Image (tube, rainbow, N blue to C red):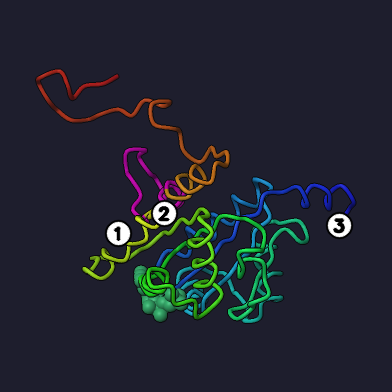
Amino acid sequence: MTESMTNNLSKARTVNLAFTGASGAQYGLRLLQCLVAAGCRVNVMVSKAAQIVIATETDLKLPGTPPAMQKTLSEYASAEPGQVLVFGREDWFSPPASGSGEKAPLVVCPCSTGTLSALATGASNNLIERAGDVALKERRQLILVPREAPYSEVHLENMLKLTRMGAVIMPASPGFYHRPESVQDLVDFIVARILDHLGLPQDLMPRWGEARVTAKVDRNDGFGQHD
Ligand SMILES: Cc1cc2nc3c(=O)[nH]c(=O)nc-3n(C[C@H](O)[C@H](O)[C@H](O)COP(=O)(O)O)c2cc1C
């Protein structure tokens, strides 16, 4: 790493990114690529179930140990050395594990209903749950991207509880008004919304009102037709 790269990284914004075992590994992986491209330093945490989901849903071969995972994810995201750091499930000495660690937002993407429940109750049984607990107690930005269908009363109660505590629930429910032509377009829809909430620039999707969305509704009252 050159001296200027080290300087740039030391000034870089840090984002904590946790992958858990909900379907939608693509959202988290795309987010990682975008955070790296935006010049962020990314502290990554991966649950055991997330490893299984990543293997099921993608061609990425994610090895088991944090150093090996770090190498694979750094290559995947074309990161500079040291830009992507992976922390183990019980790495209680890592920055995301303590309120006195670097102040950084946490995005759990995708977020399983299991982790949702742990965060709603403060379980803190692994680094991801602890990082969420720290974000809540320190009033830091916490963005959760749950995916389940349908949601049970427990899931909904947990989401309500977490929203009231300050977390943003960003369901993996892409819109279709941008006329997606690929799975990538759907993934980018959600990733763009996350980047917006993190205050990072993104050009994955035109902003509402910038590119005209054409309504195709066949109405005769004049309201359905837009140019
Ligand atoms: C292929 C696969 C898909 C899954 N999809 C979901 C899902 O969409 N939502 C969910 O909440 N759990 C899902 N699960 C179950 C979670 O992985 C499981 O509850 C796990 O204990 C969550 O642990 P974690 O929160 O530590 O990652 C899935 C599991 C597998 C193997």
Q: Residue 147 location, x and y as percent?
A: 35, 63
Question: In the rendered structure, does residue 179 fall within the stretch colored magenta?
Answer: yes
Q: Who's the residue at 65% across and 48% down the image?
A: 37
Residue wearing tag 3: 1
The magenta segment is 171-189
Residue at mark 2: C-beta within 8 A of ligand 1: no
Furthest residue toward left: 220
User: Which numbered dot is residue 166?
Assistant: 2
Please tell me which of labels 2 and 1 falls first in the chain.
Answer: 1
Residue at mark 3: C-beta within 8 A of ligand 1: no
Furthest residue toward right: 3
In the rendered image, which quarter contains the C terminus?
top left
Q: Residue 90 location, x and y as percent?
A: 60, 81
Question: Chief secondary structure of the magenta span?
Answer: loop
Identify the secondary structure beneath mark 1. Answer: helix
Please tell me which of labels 3 and 2 falls first in the chain.
Answer: 3
Identify the secondary structure beneath mark 2. Answer: loop
Closer to the eye: label 1 or 3: 1
Q: Who's the residue at 38% across and 55% down the image?
A: 169
Q: Residue 122 location, x and y as percent?
A: 43, 73
* Mark 1 surroundings within 10 Å by alpha-carbon count, few (fewer than 14), some (14 through 19), many (20 or more): some
Q: Amino acid at mark 3?
A: Met
* Mark 3 surroundings within 10 Å by alpha-carbon count, few (fewer than 14), some (14 through 19), many (20 or more): few
Closer to the eye: label 3 or 2: 2
Q: Amino acid at mark 2?
A: Gly
Q: Is residue 40 above or below residue 97?
A: above
Residue wearing tag 1: 160
Measure how far apart labels 3 and 2 are at the Cα level: 38 Å
